[in-house]
Image (cartoon, grey):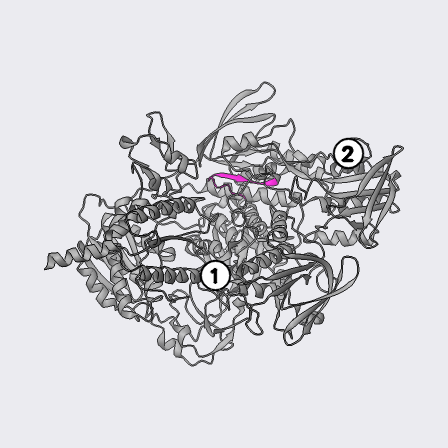
Amino acid sequence: MRLQYPTNIEIIKVPCTGKVDIIHLLLAFEEGADGVLVAGCLEGDCHYQAGNLRAKKRVQRVKEILDRVGLNAQRLEMYNLSAGMGTRFAEIAREMNARVLELGPSPIRLAKASKTMAKAA
Amino acid sequence: MAMHRETDKIGAVLVVGAGVAGMQAALDLANSGYYVYLTDRSPTIGGIMAQLDKTFPTNDCSMCIISPKLVEVGRHLNIEVLPDTDVETLEGELGHFRATLNRRPRYIDPVKCTGCGDCRKVCPVMAVNEFNAGLDLREATYIRYPQAVPLAFAIDRQVCIGCGLCGQVCLAQAIKYHDVPVKREIEVGAVILTVGTEVFDPSGLENYHYAQQPNVVTSLEFERILSASGPYRGHLMRPYDREEPKKIAWLQCVGSRDVRTNSYCSAVCCMYAIKEAVIAKEHAHGDLDTAIFYMDMRTYGKDFEQYYNRAREEHGVRFIRSRVHSIDPDGECDLRISYVDDRGEKQSESFDLAVLSVGFQVSESVKHLARRLGIGLNQHNFAQTDPFMPVATSRPGVYVCGTFQCPKDIPQSVMEASAAAAACSAALSEARWTRTKSKAVPPERAVSAAEPRIGVFVCNCGINIGGIVDVPAVREYARTLPQVVHVEDNLYTCSQDTQVKISKIIQEHNLNRVVVAAWTPLTHEPMFQETLIDVGLNKYLFEMANIRNQDSWVHMKEPERATAKAKDLVRMAVARARLLKPLVEKPLDITQRALVIGGGMAGLIAALNLADQGFETIIIEKDKELGGNARHLGHTIEGRDVQKFLHRLIADVENHARIQILTQALVVGFSGYKGNFTTEVLVGPGMYERKIKHGATIVATGAQEYRPREFLYGEHDQVMTLLELGHKVSQRYEVAKWDRVVMIQCVGSRNAENPNCSRICCQGAVKYALQLKDINPDLDVVILYRDLRMYGFLEDYYLKARNQGVMFARYDLDNPPQVESVDGKLRVTFNDHILNCPVQMPVDAVVLSAATRAADTEELASLLKIPRSADGFFIEAHAKLRPVDFASEGIFLCGMAHSPKLISESIAQAMAAAARAGAFLADVSQTISGVTAHVDQSRCAACLVCVKTCPYGVPHINRDNVSEINVALCQGCGTCASECPAKVIQLAHYEDDQLSAKIRAAF
């Protein structure tokens, strides 16, 4: 289908969203991600029965943490779609990108960048 | 030279037709130790299922569920996929056939073609795209669909102008303009015909104006309209003006149940029309009005009735019982449907789009094939079969399954495909593993302690990657990454010659980690892993960066950014590769014995087939006698003697050296895992205990007839169930004296208490009505029904019953018939829906088509940990593609324990379960995947989170009071690892540090 979406999205493969761990979501933000999207199977269609429902709860939990530390829960979102929904994936990628652009760079990334600049100076 | 004696059977099977049924039969046989030639007329495999958008009743995406099967078939060492191939002749007999195959030229070498699609881009000629049911165009160089297997293009020479452009751009040099037909002779022991059917072409039905009106489409065209990969990219539009329709009508029985075209019922159209209506509503942006014009709503399958109810009640699909007269143009492009309603009154209504629910029919080419192969056809030109041997054709050794046997849906086709495989497997068991290929695997090199030495291979994929991404720059960048000792780029990293090259480089540079930056691991990872295995490197020391599907293809207009992203993806892959560990795939020990729970028709057939396949089998039956419900049946609707067949079957089972029967036996314990089960049974009146060790389990516990509480049943002795009528019909003398009998359908089915349809009672009523008419042609038989569900060829008997004067009158759930006893005589009152007034009649007997209800299996289900639905029937692993498997591996399901079904369907399903169990037992080289969860028990706090989290119930707290995960049972989803609060569970190959490294490397 080769539907175009923004280049700043990089995909990390896991066997099931059930394997998407809170520590990994947080790590991505800690490393400077402006946004993270979790793409799981449609609800009720999980190949491993219920991994996507577990992931949904964890995403909710991390959203709370993000809000608490001032990162904005909007930077993280879980979407449900099937492997046959390429159009939807491209749509989601664009949607998430637009949302993150509106939110601006993550404060963590900015802090890291200024630190590196300070070091360099 | 073959080492076998002349008389030895040939351990290979020819499967003709590679739709979903052909693929399933091929996989079951190849996994059971037979070499399979899988032919298809088209350039690819997948059949009609690949064209469907969603599948009922689960609304799964069709392509999503079929594509793993395509890949599995395409990669199987013992399946030879032969596209573009016709079978010309078949000589010989069971065990020793010789078939001549003719491969038509495809003009592109599928071995060299990498599927990159550069040829299509330059092709200047367009042709009708048959995959999208003719709704759009494709190039003359084409591939049916992107997931096709083999993933190779073909040239349609009927439209090709021979310009030569594709030949010039094909870097793989796969174009062969001078390709010619190739004949080939093969030897096989048996043949399976899964040639399928075509959909009816409604052009000849002038009253529907299909040929003239663009907004009259067939249901297959509508599938493509709904499909995300279809001509409109999944946007609901009508062909004439590409506007979104606001009102859509479906017309049922187009080319089915119609004496002008095909008189049989096509068995699937009611369900797919409901599905299409519901999905169309989901796709619509505003309110969409959907109406289905039908005669009888035939939602007879498992969970189908609830699907129908939801469509009507929750989605607001309108169901109009009617006979449609015509579809006429209305204005510029709208359509007016004229019909006669339920009361016999003329009506008409305007719609934006009309979908003709077209049925199945046998194509001319299949009729010719049947003639060439010497296969008998029935009056409808489908393969002639016997209800007791549903997958055997008239020629011994040639089997049939799928829609060419009779119109049917996907699960039924898949089931029959496994049944046909079972028939071959039993017939050829002595030749198992004689024709199969196996691969010699060199010993594995130890790498754990060694410093990572990473090789990075970057693919250009012709110009698919290299045309956008600066591949040399990515290659040079990879060289700078720590521990990378070799880099290179290839034109096609996936091609066979590159595999040879990679093997050499791994050895020369002593690589112990390999990263390929190319395309999707989904199709290509197993192939590269094989290359690693061939040079003694553990297959888990491999990582892919998908710089095509996730980069060059989706960022075509931003080459610089795409190059930067490719570098990121490679860096991330290398970071993870560094931490990859070799994993051991432990062999699975499999006890070569099967246990069948239930000694009814299904259990007996399954046991006999498994024993014929060569496996020791034990049957457990709770009653004193074998035979189950079949003991109470006289003849099938086709007139075949059930008792005669059952007695012979029981004798065969009792005399089989490999079968042991335990009657009056009760399962009281069940433990172990796939390949290694232990079942505890109490046997006989003495209740002595036995422990049985077995590798596979088949559940065939049957169902029972509902004891009605309605219609004076149990109060008046002339009110009886169908089974009870059956006894009286066999005895003849009582029924011969009757003047009038009324049969009432759906007693205890399709109501609030039990929403399911019991599937078999309509044919039961018609069968006994015909038998009663045989005994006494003057007898009045009245059948009071709600929808007459005479699917497939059963429709013939409905017609016959009407011709013989059986009266059919419809009633509604909210206005059921009344049965009274007046001075001991029975009287029935019902509302005639055409006259719209009550009709009253004295009768000699009232026969209730009582529901088929699940047997009491609550305890068994809890012992085996297998799921049941709310109504007590067992739930299979997947409603479409795994109809006889349980989600727990090594346990299988058949017969009425799954759902109500006919004897012929129970037999097919039992054989299917035997095929699946047989394939599981036969494949002794099975290993346990390395991707499993492991507990660091020294740090486990036994908090039970993993125990509660695992969807498969695998973790348990052991005697040392710590969590233990049996790797043979672990499915590798990693949910427990993510939930473990102490982080002491790791999912191998996706360990926390491996993922963390990848995340860190992204920045």
**B430 and B874: which is toward the camera:** B874
Question: How many labels, in total?
Answer: 2
Position of residue B984 relative to residue B514, above or below, is above
Which percent across, then down, holds residue B526? Answer: 35, 53
Residue type beneath disc 2:
Tyr
Position of residue B160 relative to residue B791, above or below, is below
Quarter of the picture containing the C terminus of chain A is: bottom left
Pointer 2 chain: B
Q: Report the predominant secondary structure element of the magenta stretch.
A: loop
Residue B446, quarter of picture: top left
Position of residue B352 relative to residue B395, above or below, is below
Pointers 1 and 2 in contact (CB under 8 A)?
Answer: no
Q: Is residue B391 visible?
A: no
Left or right: B84 in relation to B981:
right
Q: What is the magenta range?
A: B884-895
Given the current orientation, which residue lies at the most extreme top position?
Answer: B686
**Secondary structure beneath disc 1?**
strand
Residues packed near mark 1 inside 10 Å, few (<14), some (14 to 19) or many (20 plus)? many
Q: Is residue B725 visible?
A: yes
Q: Between disc 1 and disc 2, whose residue precedes? A: 1
Which percent across, then down, holds residue A29? Answer: 27, 51
Pointer 1 chain: B
Left or right: B810 in relation to B481:
right
Residue B726's disc is none
Residue identifier under label 1: B82
Which percent across, then down, holds residue B467? Answer: 30, 71
Does B886 appear in magenta?
yes
Q: Residue at x 27, y 55 (%)?
A: A33
Q: Residue at x 20, y 62 (%)?
A: B477
Residue identifier under label 2: B713
